[in-house]
Image (cartoon, helix red, strand yellow):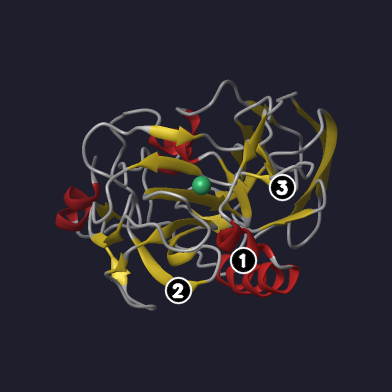
Amino acid sequence: MSWILKAFSLLALGAISFATPSFPLTVNPLPLLPGEAASVSVKAYTNSPPQGEFAGQALRFVWDGENWVAFFGLHALTKSGKYPLRICLPSGPCQEMELFVAHKDYPVEKLRLPEEKMALLKPEIVEEEREVVAKAYSTFSAKPLWLLPFSPPLEGKLVVTSTFGLRRAYGNSPPSGFHDGVDFRAKEGTPVYAPAPGRVILARELALRGKMVVLDHGAGVMSGFLHLSEIAVKEGQEVKRGELIGKVGNTGLSTAPHLHWEVRVNGVAVNPLTWLGKSFRPERPPFLKNPRAWLRLAP
Ligand SMILES: [Zn+2]
């Protein structure tokens, strides 16, 4: 198993491998959980990647040196049950199976916002901004730059004020969505650091999300930092793990200074805290030829 899958398996509750005469296939972790990420790896020495789909989500495979691997996210509101996975090699055989998604309920959080902040929730503002952010998160670069665990985006003890997945209801309205990141309490101006190496895809001020930075960590893994008071990077810039990307603020739809951090995998929001989870000593990634570069990335 390659370094990246070994790394991922440490977040796992379990994994399953399927070997048929056609090609070996591993899904990890199982059972799948709403609001968490998983990987599918395929051992096949083909020149081009396999094609695959899970529950209607197109999978995007990258070569990690030993396997074709695709990372995907389970939407936080996915209902428990069996969902179809289908993988085909470029030249032929396909495998189909059903994967079980376990049950996970996220509680409802009621939010009260001052009138001027509520005014930001106009459908046209919400939609316009959703498109900008969706475009940023649709970026895909095949080279995985990340290692697990990610490092925390803030220094010191992390104080979580709102967890991932909470169903959110504004005022007296029914829940209109869910919290697609995690909120950390922090003073205005607290430095925010890149949790993993990446490229800056978006660095600008938006009405609801305030000053926002999106990083592409490669292989479909992205992270976003919202409500910043200052942005310290430019779109297109490469950042190292631990590099300053901005400062905590209260811009956009926010009632007090805090950092909202989100992680998207293949475009789906997943729980960022899982990515800080475990410590381990990975092997040297095969695609990093320069040992010095590797030392800088090592946790
Ligand atoms: Zn938040």
Q: In terms of image quadrants, where is residue 233?
A: bottom left
Of marks 3 and 2, which one's residue comes earlier in the chain? 3
Q: Is residue 48 visible?
A: no
Q: Kindly tell me whether mark 2's CB lies below 8 Å from ligand 1.
A: no
* Camera-nearest residue between 97 and 34: 34
Q: Which residue lies under the disc numbered 1? A: 120
Q: Please, is residue 10 above or below residue 228 in the view? A: above
Q: Which residue lies under the disc numbered 2? A: 205
Q: Kindly tell me whether mark 1's CB lies below 8 Å from ligand 1.
A: no
Q: Tally the numbered discs.
A: 3
Spot occupied by residue 40 in the image (x, y as percentages of width and height): 63, 42
Q: Amino acid at mark 1?
A: Leu
- Secondary structure at badge 1 equals helix
Q: Amino acid at mark 3?
A: Gly
- Secondary structure at badge 2 equals strand
State the separation of the CA atoms marked 1 and 2: 14 Å
Q: Please, is residue 164 above or below residue 29 in the view? A: below
Q: Are marks 1 and 2 in contact (CB under 8 Å)?
A: no
State the separation of the CA atoms marked 1 and 3: 16 Å
| Circle 1 Cα neighbour tier, 10 Å, few/some/many (<14 / 14–19 / ≥20) | some
Q: Amino acid at mark 2?
A: Glu
Spot occupied by residue 225 in the image (x, y as percentages of width and height): 42, 57
Q: Are marks 3 and 2 in contact (CB under 8 Å)?
A: no
**Quick check: 105 left or right of 83?**
left
| Circle 2 Cα neighbour tier, 10 Å, few/some/many (<14 / 14–19 / ≥20) | some
Quarter of the image that includes the C terminus: top left
| Circle 3 Cα neighbour tier, 10 Å, few/some/many (<14 / 14–19 / ≥20) | some
Q: Are marks 1 and 3 in contact (CB under 8 Å)?
A: no
Of marks 1 and 2, which one's residue comes earlier in the chain? 1
Q: Which residue lies under the disc numbered 3? A: 177
Spot occupied by residue 163 in the image (x, y as percentages of width and height): 52, 34
